[in-house]
Amino acid sequence: MIPAALAQTHGMAFDGKGWPAADFERYLGDTTILIHGNDTCFAVFRLAAPEAEILTLATHPDAQGRGHAASMLLGALDALASAKIETVFLEVADDNAAALALYARAGFAQFSTRSNYYANGASAICMKAALSPASGA
């Protein structure tokens, strides 16, 4: 993976408010971070065994709507389960219907809400998924 390409995808997926390439370069060398996917569709996880947190998930706009994120996320959850991660957490804006649907299909369930969490006033939906080492995710 190329930090500049990750930053470009992230920026385009988040309306120009993405992370800089320097962040991705640092993450690629950090053993507590897993970036799963490729330059056009990826998720960044912080690992704190037996848990992990999705810090971000991004798909380049040109690749959206084709199932890439769903496939990538399920593959990531399988890899995490194989690495003995038991639970994965995330926060997603309550106005991001596509992401909420993606996470629900991948087995995530809401456990809490953080009201007015984002700068635009959206609330954060806190979700988690329990992973099973025997079956992958």
Image (cartoon, rainbow, N blue to C red):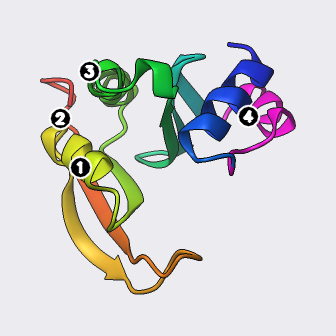
Where is residue 58 drawn, in percent x and y?
A: 50, 35
Q: Which mark is residue 70?
A: none
- Height in image: 36 above or below 19? above
Q: Nearer the viewer, mark 3 or mark 4?
A: 3
Spatial CA span between label 2 and label 3? 23 Å
Whether tag 2 and tag 3 are in contact, CB under 8 A, the answer is: no
Q: Of all residues shown, which one is farthest toward the right? A: 22
Which of the two discs, 1 and 4, labels the residue nearer the N terminus? 4
In percent of the image, x 78 and y 26: which residue is there?
29
Magenta residues, start to end: 17-31
Q: Nearer the viewer, mark 1 or mark 3?
A: 3
Asked whether residue 130 is in view, the answer is no
For label 1, the residue is 129
Spatial CA span between label 4 and label 2? 26 Å
Q: Residues within 10 Å of mark 4 (few under 14, many from 20)?
A: some
Where is residue 34 drawn, in percent x and y?
A: 57, 30
Residue 97 placement, left or right of 7: left
Spatial CA span between label 1 and label 3? 20 Å
Residue 75 placement, left or right of 7: left
Which of the two discs, 4 and 2, labels the residue nearer the N terminus? 4
For label 2, the residue is 132
Q: Residues within 10 Å of mark 3 (few under 14, many from 20)?
A: few
For label 4, the residue is 27
Which of the two discs, 1 and 3, labels the residue nearer the N terminus? 3
